[in-house]
Amino acid sequence: MREKNVKRESSDVAEATCVPRPRDRIVASAQDLFHKHGIRGVGVETIADAAGTNKMTLYRHFDSKDELILEYLNYKGKKSEEVWADIERSNPGDPAAQLYDFVERAAIFIAEDERGCDLANAAIELTEQGHPGLRVIEEFKSRQRDRLANLCAAAGASQPGLLADTLFLLIEGARVSRRNVGTKGPSANLLQTSRGVLASFGVPAREA
């Protein structure tokens, strides 16, 4: 009997450790709601309810909604870094292939998710001058552009800085077009256009 009780207690402990902590639930709920409805479209009470907790608990972990917004924006930046790391792993030592892989993934993401870029959306919503979230977004977008420029240079592009800006604008524009006119609009040609741009700057096509 004692052995059964010990096993049951061990099982209960193991199950309990699998339950996300309140802070983790709050962050996960905020990420989901901000992505679906926008930062301004979601209040802290809604986030707390979705996390299965209350506002008091939420404010125990985050001093304000702005602090939760920063957590959200930084999380999105980290997810992007993971994508870049996967691109490098999939195409080791081949910057040209990495560029083509990048635009292919961007095209798929834009086609599948009508909400577009979370950071770009947040930049529109955060209208307060000097909001710390704007600095996070600006730094992220600058790193993204610089990473592209470095990759374009490594791939042998004729004008790496200009190519990076062109790809950046193409992708940002495709996200807006996807939101405005859907998947059958100009965003549907993002991959084909990006490949043509890469080739025009002298970046060799990926081998089949």
Image (cartoon, rainbow, N blue to C red):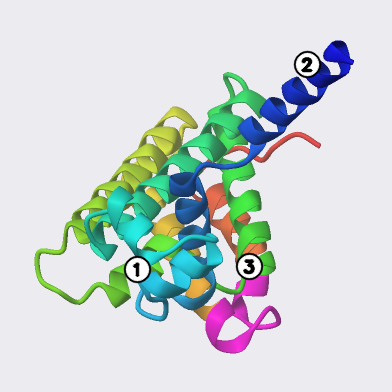
Q: Which of marks 1 and 2 is nearer the N terminus?
A: 2
Mark 2 is surrounded, within 10 Å at the Cα level, by few (under 14), some (14 to 19) or many (20 or more) other residues, namely few
Q: Which amino acid does label 2 sit on?
A: Val
User: Which residue is found at the position 29% from the left and 51% from the top?
Assistant: 60
Q: Position of residue 50 (x, y in %)?
A: 54, 66
The reply to whether the magenta stretch includes residue 115 is no
Q: Residue 17 carries which label?
A: none
User: Which residue is found at the position 81% from the left and 37% from the top?
Assistant: 208
Q: Position of residue 128 (x, y in %)?
A: 14, 74
Mark 1 is surrounded, within 10 Å at the Cα level, by few (under 14), some (14 to 19) or many (20 or more) other residues, namely many
Q: What is the span of residues highlighted in magenta in the rendered image?
A: 178-189
- The residue identified by callout 2 is 6
- The residue identified by callout 1 is 122
Q: Earlier in the sequence, mark 3 or mark 2?
A: 2
Q: Which mark is residue 113?
A: 3
Q: Position of residue 129 (x, y in %)?
A: 10, 71
